[in-house]
Amino acid sequence: MLENSDRFPMRELKLYDNDGDRQGILGEALEILLKEQAPDLKFSYTTDPEEAFSDVDFVMAHIRVGKYEMREQDEKIPLKYGVVGQETCGPGGIAYGMRSINGMLEIIDYMEKYSPDAWMLNYSNPAAIVAEATRVLRPDSKVLNICDMPVGTLRRMSQIVGTTPDKLEVSYFGLNHFGWWTSVKDKATGYEYINEIKEYVAENGYLTQVEVDTQHMDESWQATHKKAKDLLAIEPNYLPNTYLKYYFYPDYEVAGSNPEFTRANEVMAGREKQVFTAARNIIEKGTAVDGGFHIDSHASFIVDLARAIAFNAKERMLLIVENNGAIANFDDDAMVEVPCIVGSDGPEPLAQGKIPAFNRALMLQQVTAEKLVVEAYIEGSYQKLWQALSLSKIVPSAEVAKQLLDDLIEANKGYWPELK
Ligand code: NAD
Ligand code: G6P
Ligand code: MN
């Protein structure tokens, strides 16, 4: 946000977390950094909701209910049964969804109590389930759900054709972490790049040689970018979201997973360690000069979104919104990911027309599983969560779904509502 302060000037910045110890380290380091780099910006960090949520215009929400400890469980429990273990897809995503709903409702209610005019820009995961839960349980709340995967992949597409993302305009349909690009055009000339990009992706996936993507660079991510090649092979009409690999190639994914060391472990040993080491160094030295905090370009889309609302910028962005006809032959009440024009009143979804039966059937199966999770949460229904797990394309049978469910209930005690 500092990097973008010319486009999006800030008066005050407050951090909120419900874990004071974890927050304190980053808070203390940021206090030092901001004194040096933005002395006029009022900064504070707190675990007190009233203090945090009072007098704010935007709540940029990115909470991880259960933290990495529970992400590790989400990934490792399915793998015990030979099933994909992933943060947002399949059983791991469903387990995480059941945890996140409570945390999200809590912060939405704080925002509405203390700053009723504010907007929440949410990218807490699993965004699809969180979005469905807010649609059902807080239908009038000003919450926008957004994902950075299409942003990151568009950056790679722009590298493939030798341009920059801001010069491109896309059409896209799907659900969060479950969709396809139907067009990637030059904004100024209308030139359609999709065939050139497809040719490249058919060979290399989205793997490019340019090192500007700070968010998706680890080894496991490189494999993910590459695998897009096989996603294009199964559906050659459109360019795939990388997350489809968990649904189309789960056997490949499980074969390549180490059940003792999953992505949560990779993150804890990598990003998490780097960030906290950098913070501790800043605190120790009392200065952030050469302190090891770097701008992460992936976050700039949150500024784009905030700007679009604050300045009625009519920015075209992909958001997770209620369908209501945007995809003509898909359920009105499904939370879909489509391009929207964003201004002060929020997003206006753009019509994407009708979609083919293949994609539609896959999406319907997935969105129904997501809806069942939310119903299971609301009703405390074991049966519905079992159905949700059985419906997930990643889970091989109702029997495995039931075993998984029983293990996940045990692991998520204290986080999930009680299921009957
Ligand atoms: P992180 O684990 O580094 O930090 C999350 C923080 O949330 C922790 O400090 C934790 O204490 C706090 N927290 C947990 N429950 C809370 C609650 N109920 N109230 C307040 N704070 C709470 O996580 P991160 O890497 O910054 O990611 C945060 C979230 O953003 C995750 O859900 C992640 O999946 C998601 N994410 C989404 C996208 C996207 O495309 N939508 C991209 C990146 C990250
Ligand atoms: C992408 C997705 C996010 C997800 C993240 C995981 O950016 O869009 O929804 O949270 O990847 O990244 P990580 O590095 O934590 O595995
Ligand atoms: Mn995402």
Image (cartoon, rainbow, N blue to C red):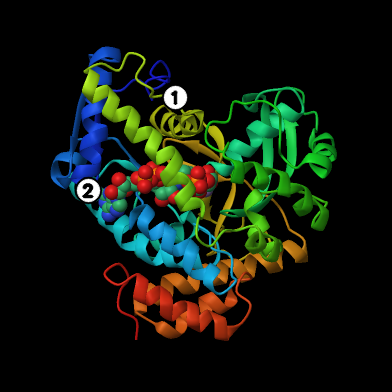
Q: SS at mark 2?
A: loop
Residue projecting furthest to the front: 260
**Three-letter code for the amino acid on which mark 1 is drawn:** Ile
Lateral position of residue 189 relative to residue 306, left or right? right
Asked if the residue at label 2 sits under 8 Å from ligand 1, the reply is yes
Q: Which residue shows up at 63% across the image and 68% down it?
A: 364
Q: Which residue shows up at 23% across the image and 16% down it?
A: 35
Residue 53 screen position, x and y as percent = 21, 42
Where, quadrant-wise, is the N terminus in this rendering?
top left
Task: Name the disc covering residue 19, or none.
Answer: 2
Residue 299 screen position, x and y as percent = 46, 33
Camera-side residue of 199 and 118: 199
Where, quadrant-wise, is the C terminus in this rendering?
bottom left
Q: Which residue shows up at 59% across the image and 70% down it?
A: 83
**Three-letter code for the amino acid on which mark 2 is drawn:** Asp
Lateral position of residue 117 relative to residue 295, left or right? left
Q: Is residue 261 above or below residue 168?
A: below
Sooner in the amino-acid sequence: mark 2 or mark 1: 2
Asked whether residue 364 appears in the rendered view, the answer is: yes
Q: CA distance from mark 2 to mark 1?
A: 24 Å
| Disc 1: CA contacts within 10 A as few (<14), some (14-19) or many (>=20) | few
- The residue beneath circle 1 is 295
Q: Is residue 385 above or below residue 147?
A: below
